[in-house]
Amino acid sequence: MPYADTNGFRCWYDYRENVPGAPTVVLCNGIMGTLEGWERQLPAIERLGLNALRFEYRGQWRSALTRPWPWSFDTHAEDLAALLTELGVARCHVVGTSYGGFVAMRFAARYPERTMSLMALTTAARIRPLAQRIVMNWRNWAQAGDIARKFSGMIPDLYSERFLAAHGERIDAGMEAARQAAEETPDFCEGQVALHDTSFRELIGADTFDVLACIDCPTLVVAAEEDRLYPPVDAQEVAAAIPGSRYLVVPGAGHALVVEKPREVNLLMAGHLHESQ
């Protein structure tokens, strides 16, 4: 996987050109996600005869941290547009989860001529008081450099109770591997603080619904029934603000929908992309 020096920072990305000249699906990570988190979506995209682009935001994991911060979702959208231009991709489908949903929605609003469709999973247009408390804990653990507590403390807010009961050991092992990787990643904690501060600046007290009204492409908004961070009511608000969008709820899943229900996500994504060609 290469780096691209684009729009003022060094971006870590992976571009899978399965069919030269075919449309590209851009996959936008959650705030703690790496681009490898989309691994189970790649075969579905390839079967559809589409290309796939995964990347990490400035300050996230292997991409370079730029100062000063916080940034804005407009900055992330501009970063993605510059990366697409670097790769010679004129138009794309955009899929984002959680923080990636914020980025995907802003990209679709700012670059309608480049957006073929939008799929926003477990995301919101504002951060409610409970989510503010949850995310502030994540931010403060990062600011304190307490990586172990950050990774272990996030678990109850990411997964449904049923998934935790069935896959607790797998989750613990994955979080431990992620913790070790974070310990070895320069600027990891500062980057996490920067990303959290960006979301706070953009989504607390700001009016983002006018931005959503500018989105003019086939849009699917997906909620997870047991999401504590951005519950279905948040996704409903997003869908109501985007003209002509569709709204669905995946039952029995928590915020980490892409991890808990990859098959369901792939089926929804495949149907949405097929209808949006």
Image (tube, grey):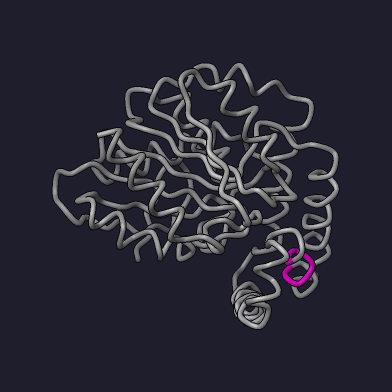
Residue 207 in picture, x, y percent from top left:
70, 20
Locate the N terminus by quadrant: bottom left
Residue 18 in picture, x, y percent from top left:
19, 57
Where 23 falls versus 47 (above or below)?
above
- Asked whether 35 falls inside the magenta stretch, the response is no
Residue farthest to the left, as pictured: 20
In-image side of 203 versus 94 (left or right):
right
Residue farthest to the front, as pictured: 251
Q: Quadrant of residue 205?
A: top right
Locate the C terminus by quadrant: top left
> How many labels sit on residues?
0
Which residues, given as a range, are shown in magenta?
A: 151-155
Q: Quadrant of residue 217?
A: top left
- Asked whether 154 falls inside the magenta stretch, the response is yes
Residue 31 in picture, x, y percent from top left:
62, 53
Where 216 falls versus 88 (above or below)?
above
* Residue nearer the viewer, 23 or 143: 23
Residue at image location 77% in from the left, 32% down from the top: 204
